[in-house]
Structure formats: C-alpha cells, structure tokens
Image (cartoon, coloured by chain):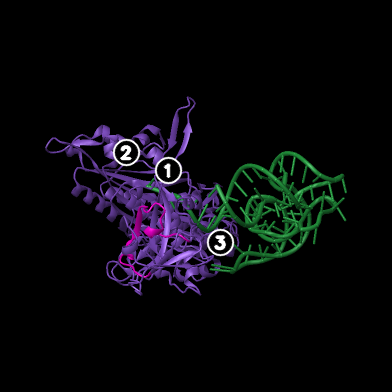
Amino acid sequence: MRWSQTFIPTLKETPADAEIPSHKLLLRAGLIRKLTGGLYTFLPLGLRALRKVEQIVREEMDRAGALEVLMPALQPPEIWQRSGRYQAAREVLFRLQDRAKREWLLGPTHEEVITTVVAGEISSYRQLPKNFYQIQTKFRDEIRPRFGLMRAKEFIMKDAYSFDATDEAAQISYRKMYDAYARIFQRCGLKTIPVEADAGVMGGKFSHEFMVPAETGESEVVYCEDCGYAANIEKATSAAPKSEIRNPKSEIEKFATPGVVTIEALAQPPYHIPADRQIKTLVYLLESKLILILLRGDHQLNEAKLAGVLGTTQFRAATAEEIYAELGAHPGSLGGVAATLKSGTLPIYADEALRGAVGMTTGANEDGFHLRNVSIERDLVVQQWADLRLAQAGEACSQCGRPLKVRRAIEVGHVFKLGTKYSEALGALFLDEEGKQQPAIMGCYGIGVTRTLQAIIEQCNDTDGIIWPVSVAPYAVCITPLTVTADSPVMILAEKICAELSSHGVEVILDDREERPGVKFKDSELIGFPIRIAIGEKSLAKGEVELKPRAGTLVAVKSDGAVARVLQLLHV
RNA sequence: CGGAGCGUAGCUCAGCCUGGCUAGAGCACUUGGUUUGGGACCAAGACGUCGCAGGUUCAAAUCCUGUCGCUCCGACCA
C-alpha cells in the first residue's frame, strides 16, 4: 500500500478531549475519529489493527472447537422478559420502536438469543456439547462513556456460549475457553493476569476475568506475589489482622463527643481511639426495611459481597432522613448496640473481622454521643456474620498470609460458568441418557475486542507513539524513501523491496509522500510500525538501507539483504 | 443523577474578569519561491452563524437566564 493512496490523518497535537495515553494515540495516529461521546469511526489504519485482533480471536475460538455464528443486534423484548433481565438490565438497554409502535432493543449481549436458538434445535445429549461464538457490535447505554474505546455506547465484542449435558462437561468447556483466552491475549502481545471475579447478577458461580495491568484501568486487582492469588477487588478476600484487645470486661460507657461524625475525628485528640477499635455502622435499605452493616472502623464495605450475602442487588444506602426516622440519630453517631435501638432489633450483618471484638467504640444512636467498651457478642445481636469488607493493600493474603498488593487494570475478557439460569428460563432442554429432561448447563465467555485493541496501545507505547506488536500492527513494515521522485534510484529500490516483502506475505506500507524526512520519521514512530526501512541517497551510495525496529536500535544492512533480514526479524 | 471544568477557524488555544474599532495566534490547508536525513523558511491567500435560544444594553465572544454538547471526579455499572 502506498501512503498517499490510503488515509492516515495524523495529528501533531493532542485533541483536547483525550485523557489517557491510548486514547490520545488512537486519535493522533489516525486510527479512529469520534462521532460523538462513546461513538467512534474506525479509519483505515485502525480498522486493519482491529481486524487483526478479531482474526486472532477467531482462530483461537475455532481451535478450541467453538462454532462461529452471527446473531441479530436488534432483539425483541419478549426473550428478555422471559429471562427476567428486561427489568434487571433495563438501565443499560437501548430501546426503540418500529413504525407499528412495537418495542425493540439493541442487544447489549446475546444469552437470550443463543439460548432461544439452542432451545429450538437441541433436544438430545447426543448433540452436546456445543459452543457458539460471534463477533458482533453490542450496545449499552453506559452512564458515562469514557476513555475512547474503553467504555463506549457501541463496541465490538466476541461472545461465546457453551452448552453442556453435565457439570463435568461444563467444567471442561470452561477450561477450554480459559486456555484459549490465555493464548489470544498472548498472541495480541498483551500481558494479562487472570483473576477470580465476582459473578454478579449473571447468576454464575464460577468466573475469571482477564486483566491488563494499567494505571488507567477502571478495575482493581488484588494479588499476592508469593502464592499467585489474584482476584478482582469485588471478590478478593483478605485476612484482617486482629485488633489489639483492651479493657475486655468493662461495662459499656456513654461519653460525649460533640460534633464528632467521622471515624477519623474519633481517632484524633482528645479521643485517641484508633480506627481499628471503632465499629463502623452503615444503614442500608433492603426491601423497604432498614438493615445495619457493621465493619471495623478502618475497613470499607464491599457492596458486591453484600449483594452476595443478601442474595440480591436490590438494596441501597439509606438516606439521612430514613436513618433518623428509625434510629433517632444522624450518620456519624450510629451504632448497633441493642440497648440503643428504638425497636430493640434491626437485622445486623457484621463483617468477620469484628468477630469476638471487645472494648470497641461505636455510636450511641444519639447525636453527639458514643459508647466505649462495647463487646460485639455481648452487646449486639448479630443476625449474620460474613466477609463484607473490601480487601486492602498490605493485608494478609487469605491463602498464604503474605501481604497483598492492589493495582489497577483493564478488564479485557471474562469467562463465566452460568449454570442453568437461561436454559431453564428459555427452555433449552434436552433428554439425557435415561430419557430425563434436563436444562443445558451453560457458560458464557466475552472479550471486548475494541477494548482489547486500546489496551494493547495502552500497554505498548512510548513518548514517540505506539509500539505495535507484529501480530496486530496495521502494517508490519513501513518503507520510507527519502526521495520519492519516480525513477530515482532511491524510489526504485524502495519499490523493489516493497514488492519482494509483499510477495513473502508481509504487509508493507510505502511512504511515498513528498514530505521532509523528519515528518515521515515522526509519523512512522507515532503510528508504531514494527519495522521501518529508511532509504536515502547517502546510505544508498554505500549500497545500504537503514533498518529500524520500532522498539530496537537502527542497523545499516546491504540493500540486497534487507528483505531477508526483515523476514528474520518478523519470524516469518 | 451530584460536583467541577470547557464550548471562539480543520486542530491546539488567546481574547471574556473590566462590554466598544474590521475577532486573533500557532499548526494544518491553497499558490509561488527557497530548502531537503528528524515535525523547514519567506511571501501571498482561503477558512468563523464566537455551541444554540432568549434577555440586559446605544453597543454582547465578553454580562444575565435557559438549553444542548464535550471532558473530568463521584455515584452507578449483567
């Protein structure tokens, strides 16, 4: 391809609305352009890289035995009503009407569609297992699209759905996808960490996310360098150190704390009560009733874990008014001590780290007062103990006891064991060997293809621009003749090398623009072609061309050996 | 949805506080010339409903109100 024949609008300056490196580079290198927030056009170069990622995904899905299909983006609400997600997921659904006023939605995912297909076509265990996948545009009404392709209203996703007759078979399907994902991201040149993940309301029991470590990521990963434990922050557990025990037997004592409404304030003079000796009392509203959540003062609630304990996501933090009406005090003065509760009881969910805690301080349910010498088992009625807290860096790994670390990451893939939620709801049933009707056991497996592309750029760049891994580069080689006059020796050689590389299947772009060398060099580095071959009068006089790997050092090679050297570098 | 910021040329931005000549700069673009191994130089030129609507005023890019859009933080997020 000749540069002048394609369309690569590079930018010298960074567009004002890009914030993170990969987003800036996507725009500056002329890969994408924004139509409006969360919606982007892929320009020729960006599309080439995107197709490379798609093809790697496709090859590995095929290798793993998955079967490619293509499902409609436009879907009828009925199947979503049957699965129960028309309500559960209504916030993210783009909904529309046709001319007959009939309702439709743009699919944010395709469990309902594929399960409907399978329900109609599969009726025997002999037809299982099956795994169907597609690479399709998905639509989600994101609250806040951001960071370019990272979180968009419309994006390309690979999703696969497995159907198995038995639990054991489903485990095998899951494992195959897990292994395929590791290969896919490796081939894309990405370093990923597979982490245990919260299955959320997808209804699954078993789940891993593939994370790309990056400061700009939207997720947080908790990991242990010693034993290899790694989990999404929503799922991660930790062993909290026991707080020091003092005054174990003393009676509860009420004391005045005028104006004190934070853990931090109570830790300061004149009170000097360390955060880990305070009980934090949170009030939530569950099915229009208040519940109390108790944590140690230095811990934070993990709402995903709370959802798991409550068995629903239909809860929220209570408002100050709701709290005052029931407890007679405002946030900052709340506590779960039975004697201070108006009704005597409220359902109390307490974090495990508080088990056995004595000599604690908590709110008195009276503004301006706290209680000290509280023994949680003696003075409170805990309905349920559970792991409710957010794991923090430095806490002990629950597997090996070594300190945990936390870092940000971009989620690029997610594998779920779904179970039978959708197959039951949508009738994907089959007859087993005994002639008994069973719902298929499902798994679902997603890869954000457009997000993966951006994650590659986020991980592979320097101050000059992108550094494409060869496997996903829009072109593997950029030939940069410094004289472009037709029939000049430089241009003739450039064209010869271009033709030879092409005949070996190498994708080459020839920068035939009448630009000064500096402009061409800067552009090629900004875009990040893995190898650049510069040909100028000076080097040609010595019978040489310059070969510059994007991430390596420049070498001069004899012009007739250039092609062989490039092929070697590309491992073709 | 709460908080903050920004909308002026294709891009990056100045001008706004303190209203007043014909609305500016750099980059990019067109033409001519000079240059030619790391984002050249000179000259000439083209490009604007100052986001939109309303208001105040003799006069609005500038002040006020509303509205739309964008960005960031938070909330939220199968």
First to last magenta residue range: A333-359
Residue A153 x %, y %: 48, 45
- In this picture, is A81 found above or below A218? above
- In this picture, is A411 found above or below A154? below
The reply to whether residue A193 is in sight is no
* Mark 1, residue position: A138
Residue A354 x %, y %: 34, 65
Q: Nearer the viewer, residue A417 or A386?
A: A386
Q: Amino acid at mark 1?
A: Lys
Name the residue rendered at 44%, 36% in the picture.
A105
Residue B72 x %, y %: 54, 57
Q: Is residue A111 left or right of residue A94?
A: left
Callout 3 environment at 10 Å: few (<14), some (14 to 19), or many (20+)?
some
Badge 2 and badge 1 in a common chain: yes
Secondary structure at numbered mark 3: helix
Secondary structure at numbered mark 1: strand
Lower sequence index among marks 2 and 3 = 2
Mark in the foreground, 3 or 1: 1
Badge 3 and badge 1 in a common chain: yes
Task: Write down which chain is painted purple.
Answer: A
The CA span between labels 2 and 3 is: 48 Å
- Can you tell which mark lies on residue A114? 2
Callout 2 environment at 10 Å: few (<14), some (14 to 19), or many (20+)?
many
Prevailing secondary structure of the magenta residues: loop
The image quarter in which residue A358 lies: bottom left
The CA span between labels 3 and 1 is: 37 Å
How many dots with numbers?
A: 3
Chain letter of the residue carrying label 3: A
Quadrant assignment for the C terminus of chain A: bottom left
Badge 2 and badge 3 in a common chain: yes
Q: Nearer the viewer, residue A198 or A191?
A: A198
The image quarter in which residue A380 lies: bottom left
